[in-house]
Image (cartoon, helix red, strand yellow):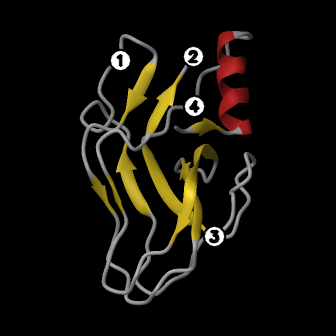
Amino acid sequence: MLEASTFEKAAIANSVFGGTTYPDAVTFTLKLFSNTVSLAGVGDEIATAGYAPLAITNNLTNFPTTTTGAKANAVQLDMTTLTADSPEIVSAGLFDENGNLRYRKVFAAPFSILNGQYYSLGIGDLTFSAS
């Protein structure tokens, strides 16, 4: 389950109460962290050989329309293949094109990605609920 960042919560509150324009993200960038990225977007992003953050287009193909208030990715999302073993990965962050953390995911159990492997998000792995 994704958790909304401080920036995201403020953007929603300001758009609902006060009439400011909600800052839509055209593209999200998924980054992996060796610690828990804070809700302010501060953390230790991994720097393993072959690692690159994953750009995810924010559209209805990747995130279909909801009628229940819950959204999830509808396609598998694959990162690049690493050319070295990663450190232990604790969390991930979805950032907008301005570098603002929008959502984070803290993994139930830390894991590492081995040399020659890649991180893959299955359908539904990026889930958000407005409830």
Q: Which mark is residue 131?
A: 2
- Separation of marks 4 and 3 at Cα, in angstroms: 28 Å
Disc 2 or disc 1, which is closer to the eye?
Answer: 2
Please give the residue where the numbered disc 1 appears in the rendered image. Answer: 66
Looking at marks 2 and 4 on the same chain, the residue that comes earlier in the sequence is marked by: 4
The x, y position of residue 77, in whole percent, is 30, 54
SS at circle 4: loop
Residue pushed farthest front? 109
Looking at marks 4 and 3 on the same chain, the residue that comes earlier in the sequence is marked by: 4
Tell me if residue 92 can be seen: no
- Separation of marks 2 and 3 at Cα, in angstroms: 29 Å
Looking at marks 2 and 1 on the same chain, the residue that comes earlier in the sequence is marked by: 1
The x, y position of residue 121, in whole percent, is 35, 53
- Separation of marks 2 and 4 at Cα, in angstroms: 21 Å
Please give the residue where the numbered disc 4 appears in the rendered image. Answer: 23
The x, y position of residue 73, in whole percent, is 34, 38
- Separation of marks 4 and 1 at Cα, in angstroms: 19 Å
Which residue is rendered at x = 44% and y = 77% of the image? 51
Which residue is rendered at x = 40% and y = 82% of the image? 114
The x, y position of residue 74, in whole percent, is 27, 37
SS at circle 2: loop
Q: Quadrant of residue 75?
A: top left
Vertical side of 92 occupied by 68: above or below: above
Mark 3 belongs to which amino acid?
Ser
Which residue is rendered at x = 49% and y = 31% of the image? 128
- Separation of marks 3 and 1 at Cα, in angstroms: 32 Å
